[in-house]
Image (tube, grey):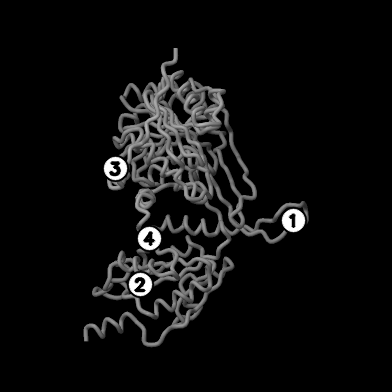
Amino acid sequence: MQGPAPADHPMPEIPVAELSEAVRQLRRASVLVVGDAMLDRYVYGRVARVSPEAPVPVLAVEREVAMPGGAGNVVRNLTALGAAVAFVSVVGDDQAGSDLTGLIGGQPGVEPWLLVQGGRATTTKTRFIAAGQQLLRADHEQASPINERLAERMVRIAADAVAATTVMVLSDYQKGVLAGDTCQRLIAAGRAAGRRVVVDPKGSDYARYAGADLLTPNRAELAQATGMPVDTEAAIVAAAESLRAAHGFGAVLVTRSEDGMTLVEADAVRHFPAEAPEVHDVSGAGDTVVAVVAAGLAAGLSVPLAARLANIAAGIVVGKVGTAVARESDLLEALTPERGALRKVMGRAGAIEQVERWRRRGWRVGFTNGCFDLLHPGHVHLLEQARGWCDRLVVGLNSDASVKRLKGAARPIQGEAARAAVLASLASVDCVTVFEEDTPIELIKLIRPEVLVKGADYTVAQVVGGDLVQDWGGVVRLAQLLPGQSTTATVARIKG
């Protein structure tokens, strides 16, 4: 007989300093992920005409991006938090499997165990995008159960790996890796090792996950698994408690899209309102939730606190474009919105994601770069011109080490953090990102600006990356200079 319903317990107010410290603890986590790995491909281009062969748009492809999806995206989210990850999965003996293996292996802090099944197709999802809109998604997959011997080997590897980690995650996309009794065997191995097990479930047979410590279904999955209504908060709680009690789950964390999340434990219910200020793309948000919850538990946080951080992280990723991740810096920024202009200062990955969001809105992105040591009116004049030629302006800033190599041991006068902060305070600047190289060529390749700006003391042919920008249809602009304005001259006058 089912016991009394758990009581609602509001999440107590936690000081920002404590939440920030909890975020920093996530980097101490060690997590084992087992599940269906996929390859997510994004093909970007322009549509300027309709095909004469059929009434369909013609996509002029400009670039392609590939990244791990499915359970691989859980791994991406964990590494973005600084956690150590062991990853066990199966790929096919095809090019997609090879690409996915390289992408997973190239991430920091990952110990990959990607087994290969001959003749099997690696699950690949290809999205075709123009002007920020998805035109088509093409899936290539084989969802049948993996080879029985391979499943046996995978369970043995996971049983060994779980001893070196703190939490096990089962990421089930029903593509065959966790078919049959594999989940039960993995959960048994985790419990035998004294490890918590977090499951991101699929389908309607949740008996396969019996005994797991935490499940993270979304609202639709909860309805499918229980056959119960989920149209109100109370109904969601009732369905989640029914599921929890029926299969011995420690807790059920229901993700509810724009309505936030609900955590149902044996003795308490907590509701977390949505944190997203605006929603751009919900793909991959569930992977972020399970990754942050698992990292939180592995770092020793309570279930409610880990869930709260996961809710904040979900709000971050749905505001990004594509299958995105929430980094430690993203979480800390979300907790301290008063940073103001400093929010414009981003790491390279964050800057690339920001540019993708702007492009989704159809905005032209401009780029310029420099040392910007002792910002003077000449700099301000150049940046204002650059911003006038585009909708959003990214400034690449030479790191301190880069400035020393270019300008000498006595420079820079101001450190990169101070220079970035001053640049970010200007209305003409929308993003500042530091680069370590002597030139910004690698950053330009990643940003792919439509407008590249340098001062008129250069020629178009001399501008680093100018040929690339012109090749992909962009333009190079030369900004007028104010006479008598230079940091070198200013430093000389100070010394004089």
Q: Does the rendering let one see residue 365? A: yes
Q: Do the residues labelled 3 and 4 touch (CB within 8 Å)?
A: no
**Distance from label 2 to label 4 (Cα)?**
23 Å
**Distance from label 1 to label 2 (Cα)?**
47 Å
Q: Is residue 496 above or below residue 258?
A: below
- Rate crowding at label 4 as few (under 14), some (14 to 19) or many (20 or more) other CA atoms within 10 Å: few
- Residue 197 % position (x, y): 38, 28
* Residue tagged 1: 51
Number of marks in the rendered image: 4
- Rate crowding at label 1 as few (under 14), some (14 to 19) or many (20 or more) other CA atoms within 10 Å: few
* Residue tagged 2: 371
Instruction: Give me the residue at 33% from left, 27% from top.
Output: 195
Lateral position of residue 111 relative to residue 314, left or right: left
Farthest residue toward the left?
496
**Image quarter of residue 89:** top left
Amino acid type of disc 1? Ser
Q: Work out whether mark 2 precedes mark 4 in sequence or the reverse, and give the earlier one.
A: 4
- Rate crowding at label 3 as few (under 14), some (14 to 19) or many (20 or more) other CA atoms within 10 Å: many
Q: What SS does tag 2 mark?
A: loop
* Residue tagged 4: 340
- Rate crowding at label 2 as few (under 14), some (14 to 19) or many (20 or more) other CA atoms within 10 Å: many
Q: What SS does tag 1 mark?
A: loop
Q: Work out whether mark 1 precedes mark 3 in sequence or the reverse, and give the earlier one.
A: 3
Q: Is residue 422 above or below residue 490?
A: above
**Distance from label 1 to label 4 (Cα)?**
47 Å
Q: Work out whether mark 3 precedes mark 4 in sequence or the reverse, and give the earlier one.
A: 3
